[in-house]
Amino acid sequence: MELPVLTHCPYCALQCGMAITPEAAVTPRTDIPANAGGALCQKGWTAGELLTNGERLTGPLLHGRPVTWEVALDHVAGRLSRIRAEHGPDAVAVFGGGGLTNEKAYQLGKFARVALGTSQIDYNGRFCMSSAAAASTRAFGMDRGMPFPITDLAEADVVLLAGGNVAETMPPFVRHLAGPRLIVVDPRRTATAKLAWLHLQPTPGTDLALALGLLHLVVAEGLADEEYIAARTTGFDEVRTSLASWWPERVERVTGVPVARMRQAVRAMAAAGRAIVLTGRGAEQHAKGTDTVTAFINLALALGLPGTPGSGYGCVTGQGNGQGGREHGQKADQLPGYRKIDDPAAREHVAKVWGVHPDDLPGPGRSAYELLDALGTPAGPRALLLFGSNPVVSAPRSAHVSDRLGALDLLVVCDVVMSETAAMAEVVFPVTQWAEETGTMTNLEGRVLLRRKAVEPPAGVRSDLEVIRELAARLGHTWPSDPRVVFDELREASAGGLADYAGITYERIEADKGVFWPCPSPDHPGTPRPFLDRFATPDGRARFTPVEHRPAAEEIDEDYPVYLTTGRVLAHYQSGAQTRRIAPLAEAVAEPFVELHPDLAEELRIDAGDMVRVSSRRGQTQGAARISDAIRRDTVFMPFHWEGANRLTNPALDPTSRMPEFKVCAVKVERVA
Amino acid sequence: MRLVVVGNGMAGSRLVTEVRARDPHLTVTVVGAETCQPYNRVLLSNVLAGSARPEQVRLLDPTWYAAHRVEAIFGSAVTCLDRDARAVVTEDGRRVPYDVLVLATGSDAIVPPIPGVERAIPFRTLDDCERILESAGGSRRAVVIGGGLLGVEAARGLAGRGLPVTLLHLAGHLMERQLDMEAGEVLGETLAGLGVDIRTGVNAEAVLPDGVRLAGGELVEGDLVVLACGVRPVTGLAAEAGLEVRRGIVVDDEMRTDDPSIFAIGECAEHDGTVYGLVAPAWEQAGVAADVITGGKALYRGSRMVTRLKARSVELAAMGETQLTEEHAEVVRFSHRARGTYRKLVIRDGRLVGAIVLGESDAVGTLTQLFDRGGPVPGDRAGLLFPGLSATAHVADSPTLMPDAAKVCQCNNVTKGQIRACWEAGARDVAGIAAATRATTGCGTCRDAVEGIVGWLCEQEGVSA
C-alpha cells in the first residue's frame, strides 16, 4: 500500500497539515504547528471529497460546448491577440486569487506584464488583505501578516482579536488561544466571542473609533510604554494629540461599547507580560479599513508590543495563500518579492530576471473592484482571464459586477468546477486543484509551506501553470510549467525584495516543515520574528500615524434603517464553489440565512424560519430568518458563501488599500409575504 | 475668501480643522484670548482628578497651524467687531479684516456675587484647573460650590486625591437638570461613599478664609473653595455689534447670525431657543458651519443631549427628558440604592426620550444609541435595562438535559445523538468518539462536553447494570 502524501489543507490561511492517500482519504498531520495535535475542522476532514466530487470539470468548454485543449487554447490566444491589436494591451485584463500557489501568482503576474503587456491585473486578495497590508506597510515598512510564529499566541497573557471569527473560519486556530485571556471585538457574539474573556460589541463601522478610545485610555491611565515609544517608534506626539478628541465617553456614544468595558480591556492588555493584537476582515473590510488597522497598530505600539518577543500585532490572513498571493505580483501595483511596480530599482531587478527592458514593463493598473467595474466600458478592458476566483458571488455590488462581466468581448475562466462566474465564460479551462499538483503556499504566519501532489488529476485536466505556458507559447514566449522550475525563478525575482524567498527550496521546506521569509540565502535560517531588532522602515523604527474616525460610507437612515454585516460560517469557504458541492458541508448549512435580534424580529413581525427579503440601494436578496440575541438590535448578518449577499454590499473603496466596504451597509429587512 | 474665527476653544478649533479638511486653500485666521493651544475642556475633570496630565488634553499640536497655513493670533482678545468695515479689532489694536466671520467665544464661569468670592477659584479653564491643583497641594479640606455636572466631577476628583471635600448645592438634589430626585440622591450616596460630603438645599452666603458660610450662619470648613456655579454665554462682542442676542447669539440652521457673513457656534450660540453647554453639539455645529462656509448644504437641526459623568468609580449617563412621570410617558425604573444602582427609561410614542443609568452597566451604550437615533424601543423593556437578561436559553451544558439534536462539536457538526450512537457502538472515551465522529478535533473547546456525555453514558450503564 502506498504511503499517504504529506501536504496541507486546500482551504484557509492556517494551511493545516494533512496526509492524503491515493484514494483521497484525509488524516491530520501532527507535525505542523498550525494544527499541532492533529486538529482539523469539518472542511478539512471532508476535503478529500473535492477530489472525487462528480461535479468536476474535465474538459475545456467553448461557448458551453466541449472542445479539445488545442481548439480552446488557440481560440483564446487568437482572440487575445486580436483584441490587443485592435485596442492595445490594456484591453486585456487578468484577475487572480489568494488561493493560488506562489508559483501561479508569480507566473500570472509575469504573464500579464510580459506576455500580455497589460497593466490590468489584480486579484481577489484586494477584497481580503489589502487594508491590513497597507497599514502594516505604513507602520512597519513591511507586511508579513503575523510577524511571529502562531505558537506565540498560546504563550501570550492577553490576545485582542478585532473583527475575526476564527472559531468558524479556522477552528484549529482556537487551540492556540486556550492560554491567553481573549478579548474579541465584533458586532456579533460569534462562536469566537463566546469563548472570549471579554467581548466588545461595537456598532458596525465603528471599530476605528473604538481603537481610538482604547488608545486614549492607555495614554490617560499612564499605561503607555514610554521607553519603548522613545526607543523604537516615531510620530507618537502627533497621535497623542489626536487622541484628545476621542475620549472614552464620546467613543461609547459612537460605538455603543460601555466605557467600563473599554477600560477593562485596556487594563488587561497593559498588565499583561505578553500581549498580542490581531485584526481580521471585520475591522479591515471598510472604506476606512487601512486607518482602522492603523489605529489598532497604534494601540499595539503604545503598549510596546510589536517587535517584542512574545508580543506583537498581526493580521489573521484569510485565504489559503492570502499571504504569498499578495507578495509576488498579481497585485496591480506590485512586482515579485513585495516590490512596488513604480520603484525604478524594483522594475530593473525584475525586468532583468524576466529578460525584458524595464521600460517595457507596464505601470500600476486598476484595483480589483475598479477593474471589475471598468470591464466592457469604453475605457476599460474588453477581455478578462480569470484564475481562482468567483467574483459573481464574492465581489461587492455583485449584480453590477455580473453585468460588467457580461459586457466583455471575451471572458476566460480557469476553474475546478462550474462556478457562477465560470458559467458566464466564453471559454472555461478545467484545471487541477490542490492535491493534484505541487506548489508552495505561504500561510498566515509568513511560513512558506509545500503542498504536494497526492493523487492523479482526472484525465483532461491541466494545471493553471500549463494553461499559462500554453497561452504564453502562443503569444511567443517559452515558459516552464513545472512548479519547481517556476519557484526557482520566483526565488530569483524575489531576491533582495521585502518578501525574499531566495534561500527557500522545496527540500528546505520539507526538511524544516516550512521556512519563514525573508530568507535571502540558502544558509539563512529564515525569519520567524522579523521585527525584534528593527522594523523594515528606513530608520528601523515603527511609525505612528494619526488617524481619524469617520462614519460608514453608507449609514442607516429612514429608508434603510438596519446595518448589514456579512461574514462566514464554519461549513463553507469563500464563494462556496468548493464547499457547497460537498454533501456533509452543504448539509451542515444548506442555504443563506439572515440573522437578526429578537427585538428587531418582533418589530418586523418575523418568526424564525420565515423567508426574509433584505434590500439595499444596490440590490436585494432573500434568506431564512435566524433569530438570535447574539447580534446587535440594529444589525443583521448574512453569510456571503452564496450568490446574493454581495448584491447588497457597498463598493465604496478605502482611499489607500482600495478595499471595498463589505462589512457595513444600510439595508431594509422585510418578511416575504 | 478670508475666514476669521474668534475663539480658539473646542468649538473654534474644531471649526478650523473642519474647514481646513474641506478646503485647503481658504485663508484662515484664528484669534484666541487664551495663550495656550486649544484643549479639550471635557478632559479637565481628568486633569483635576490626576488621571490626565495637562499636555494630554491638547487638541492640536503647536505646529499644526503653520503646517496647515492657518494664521493663529493667541493671547489677544477681540474687543471690537466692526461690521461696516468687516474687520475685528484685538485688544492690542490689531485689525483683522474678514469676508466670513465665525464667533466661537464660548462662555464664562458664573461667579456668584457673594462676599469673599475672590478667595474661590472657578473651575472652567485649564489655567483654573492648574490653580486649583496648586492650592490643593497645601490644603486640608476643600469645598465645592455647585452640584451640577462639573461640580460633581470636581468634588470627586479632589476627593480622589485624598482631600476631604464638601459639595454644596442649592437645589434639593445633585445634577437636578439631568437627574430626577431619586437618581440625584443615589448619586449623592455613591459620592458620600467616596469621601464627598454632600450638602443639598444650601445657599452659600460668603467665602471666608477658613470656609464657606451658609445662609443661616453655619460655617462649612475648607481652605480651598472651588466654584462650579454654571456658565454664561459670552455674547458682548456680538451684542455691541448689533447682532441679535437673546441668551446666546441667535443663529439659524446654517449657524448664521442675522448678519449673513457672521456665524456663531458652540456655547455662545443659541439655536432654536437652546444654548448648548456640551461639546457634542458644539462639534456638530462646527461641522455644519464649516460645510456651509466651504459651499456645502449642511443644516443643523439641534442635538440630543447626553450627559456622561467622568468621575472614577461613578458611572452615570443621563439623556433627554429624565424627569417625565407616568402621567406623560411610560416610565421603566429599577432602583437598588444599596448598590448605587438606578436605571430609568422614559418612553413616549414608542421612542426613548430619556434615560438615566447610574452604576456600572452594559446598558449604557445601547441606550445612548437608541436615544440618539430615535428608533423604536423594543417591547422587551427589561432586556434593555438588563442586557443579557433575556438571552435565549443556551443549550443546557448538562449531558442529561441536552437534547439528542443538540450540536456538541461545532467544528465537525457532531450532535449529542451521534455521540450516543457512537458510544452504543462501543466507543468508551473521547479518543474513541473522536476517531469515529471527529468531535473535539477542530477547535477543541467541546472536549469537556464530550467527556461529560461519555461519563454520563457510562454512569447510566453502571446504574442500569
Image (cartoon, rainbow, N blue to C red):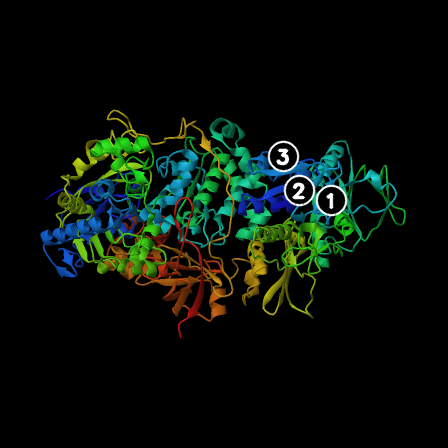
Q: CA distance from mark 3 to mark 2?
A: 16 Å
Task: Report the residue that reaches farthest toward the right.
Answer: B217
Single out the mark in the foreground, 3 or 2. Answer: 2
Which badge, 2 or 1, is on the more N-terminal residue?
A: 2
Q: Chain of mark 3?
A: B
Q: Secondary structure at mark 3?
A: helix
**Disc 3 or 1, which lies upstream in sequence?**
3
Discs 3 and 2 carry the same chain letter: yes
Instruction: Place residue B375 in its image quadrant.
Output: bottom right
Numbered tag placed on residue B196 in the rendering: 1
Q: Is residue A601 above or below residue B276?
A: below
Q: Chain of mark 2?
A: B
Q: Chain letter of disc 1?
A: B
Residue B107's label in the rendered image is none
Question: Which residue in the structure is indicated by mark 3?
Answer: B55
* Picture coordinates of residue B340, whole percent (x, y): 66, 52
| Mark 3 closeness class: few <14, some 14–19, many ≥20 residues within 10 Å | few
Q: CA distance from mark 2 to mark 1?
A: 34 Å
